């Protein structure tokens, strides 16, 4: 199996930076953007050497339109634009993007240093769609107060869930990145008693223990997001991080998967477009403001983009 990029499989670090760029003219800048993407591992090695204890890792991924411009005729089998969802007044928009950079480490200053070194040479060829500086909040909680990522696969299972294998041999070792940014209404959320919040999430706030089936409503977040097919849970590798200021706070949701169908199914159940008349009640307190899909190639495939 070809080697995946360094940020995809490890457990999340203490801080992360997510940068989404859009090309102003894909046709004229495709080769330059491909070379810039191919140079990220070397950049990460240089910045990471400033403090090896920070354990900096990175991943760069290309959106479907840029991938076609950079590598016409050789496309990952399941790469496609983000599918917007709308139901019952809730929506998950498709905002798109051409390049995604994820940097994670124990030092947010090093994350920014790498992002700046990546962004600066691109100049006017790109514009920034989104830039999110994520942080570990308390004991790995979302800003809603609940522990995030409890359902994440562990150990060797992470590679099995995230990395493309024999089903698309030309792109083995790569992974699809599925991204969204959510803005929370924390003031409204704070008016709810803990017991009601726990019913909306489906877990105890104190220790993240899942509520019993008798106590967990069918509209609870985990009841909507956890899906089983043929007796097996459909899994993704999440790297989501809370972000925020005193003016706006939320969650940058990102997962890596070998099959974009899985997060699509989760989103349809969360937003209420799955056809069963239910939706995730957490969406009454959080709204999606962006959505984009990307492909994060293996290191060998990424190097080929520089040619």
Image (cartoon, grey):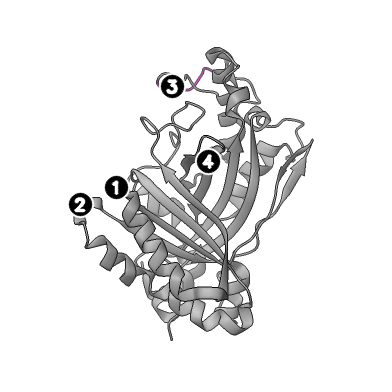
Cα–Cα gap, marks 2 and 1: 8 Å
Q: Residue at x 60, y 39 (%)?
A: 183
Q: Which residue is mark 3?
A: 209
Q: Nearer the viewer, residue 42 or 188?
A: 188
Cα–Cα gap, marks 2 and 3: 33 Å
Q: Nearer the viewer, mark 3 or mark 1?
A: 1
Cα–Cα gap, marks 3 and 1: 28 Å
Q: Which residue is mark 2?
A: 53
Question: Quick one: SS at disc 4?
Answer: strand
Label 4, residues with CA under 10 Å away: few <14, some 14-19, many ≥20: many
Q: Earlier in the sequence, mark 2 or mark 1?
A: 2
The reply to whether residue 5 is in sight is no
The C terminus, quarter of image: bottom left
Q: Which residue is mark 1?
A: 106
Q: Which residues are magenta?
A: 207-213
Main SS category, magenta section: loop
Q: Residue at x 59, y 42 (%)?
A: 182
Q: Which residue is mark 4?
A: 251
Q: Is residue 15 left or right of residue 186?
A: left
Is residue 180 on the magenta stretch? no
Residue 3 badge: none
Q: Earlier in the sequence, mark 3 or mark 4?
A: 3
Residue 66: image x %, image y %? Answer: 59, 73
Question: Quick one: SS at disc 1?
Answer: loop
Residue 88: image x %, image y %? Answer: 79, 35
Label 2, residues with CA under 10 Å away: few <14, some 14-19, many ≥20: few
């Amino acid at each position: 199996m070809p080697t995946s990029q360094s940020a995809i499989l490890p457990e999340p670090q203490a801080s992360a930076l997510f940068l989404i760029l859009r090309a102003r003219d894909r046709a004229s800048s495709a080769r330059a953007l491909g070379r810039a993407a191919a140079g990220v591992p070397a950049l990460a090695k240089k910045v990471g050497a400033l403090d090896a204890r920070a354990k900096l890792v990175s991943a760069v991924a290309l959106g479907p339109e840029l991938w076609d411009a950079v590598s016409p005729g050789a496309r990952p089998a399941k790469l496609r634009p983000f599918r917007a969802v709308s139901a019952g007044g809730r929506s998950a928009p498709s905002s798109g993007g051409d390049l995604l950079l994820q940097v994670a480490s124990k030092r947010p200053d090093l994350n920014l240093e790498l992002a700046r070194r990546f962004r600066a040479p691109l100049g006017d060829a790109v514009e920034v769609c989104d830039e999110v500086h994520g942080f570990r909040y308390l004991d790995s909680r979302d800003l809603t107060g609940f522990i995030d990522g409890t359902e994440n696969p562990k150990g060797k299972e992470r590679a099995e869930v995230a990395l493309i294998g024999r089903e698309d041999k030309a792109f083995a070792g790569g992974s699809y990145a599925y991204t969204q940014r959510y803005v929370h209404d924390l003031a409204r959320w704070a008016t709810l008693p803990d017991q009601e919040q726990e019913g909306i999430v489906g877990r105890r706030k104190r220790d993240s223990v899942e509520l019993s089936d008798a106590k967990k409503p069918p509209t609870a977040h985990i009841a909507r997001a956890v899906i089983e097919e043929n007796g097996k849970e459909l899994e993704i590798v999440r790297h989501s991080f809370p972000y925020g200021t005193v003016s706006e706070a939320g969650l940058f949701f990102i997962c890596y998967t070998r099959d974009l169908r899985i997060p699509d199914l989760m989103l349809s159940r969360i937003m209420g477009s799955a056809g069963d008349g239910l939706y995730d009640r957490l969406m009454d307190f959080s709204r999606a403001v962006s959505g984009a899909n990307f492909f994060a190639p293996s290191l060998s495939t990424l190097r080929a983009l520089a040619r």
